Amino acid sequence: MALDHKIVKVSGDPIIGYITLWNGTWKLTDMEISVLSELLKSYLKLKQEGLKEPYLSKFLFSTENKREIKNKIEDLSDQGFANYIASLKKKNIITEKNNNFIIDERVIPVKKLTFEFQ
């Protein structure tokens, strides 16, 4: 019997839900998920405000913006935040392109995903 259609609904914070859905691939810790979630929230806000690449990523990874993101996460020191950013780089979630850091586009949440199996 073939499954024609399946909907998976994510409750709570949709960004954390999206990351968690794909986390089997990345094996992120809870704190890496928190850091990535805040980065993605900032990314999506900047994008909604009209920023486009490469300026969006330049601003996202600016010292001032990273400081704002870090301050949104409880009990996280500057060094701890830097370590989690380094860990996300090591897992290729944050990559470097043309001397700019970017978030891998596969990580950026979309409202709807469609899979087709033949």
Image: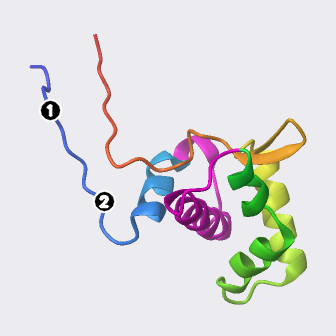
- In magenta, the rendered stretch is 24-53
Outermost bottom residue:
75
* Quadrant of the image occupied by residue 42: bottom right
Marking on residue 48: none
Above or below residue 23? Residue 32 is: below
Residue depicted at 86% across the width and 71% down the height: 63
Outermost top residue:
118
| Residue 69 relative to residue 45: left or right | right
Could you classify mark 2 by the number of other residues whose Cα lies within 10 Å: few (under 14), some (14-19), or many (20 or more)?
Answer: few
| Residue 115 relative to residue 38: left or right | left
The three-letter amino acid code for the residue at tag 1 is His
| Residue 79 relative to residue 50: left or right | right
* Quadrant of the image occupied by residue 32: bottom right
Residue depicted at 64% across the width and 64% down the height: 39
The three-letter amino acid code for the residue at tag 2 is Val
Q: Could you give the CA–CA distance between mark 2 and mark 1, rounded to whole angstroms?
A: 16 Å
| Residue 6 relative to residue 104: left or right | left
The local secondary structure at tag 2 comes to loop
Name the residue nearer the viewer: 40 or 10: 40
Image coordinates of residue 83 in percent, x first then y, are 86, 66
Residue depicted at 12% across the width and 26% down the height: 4
Marking on residue 10: 2
Image coordinates of residue 101 in percent, x first then y, are 81, 48
Disc 2 and disc 1 in contact, CB within 8 angstroms: no
Q: How is the image coloured?
A: rainbow
Image coordinates of residue 80 in percent, x first then y, are 84, 75
User: Mark 1 sits on what residue?
Assistant: 5
* Quadrant of the image occupied by residue 84: bottom right
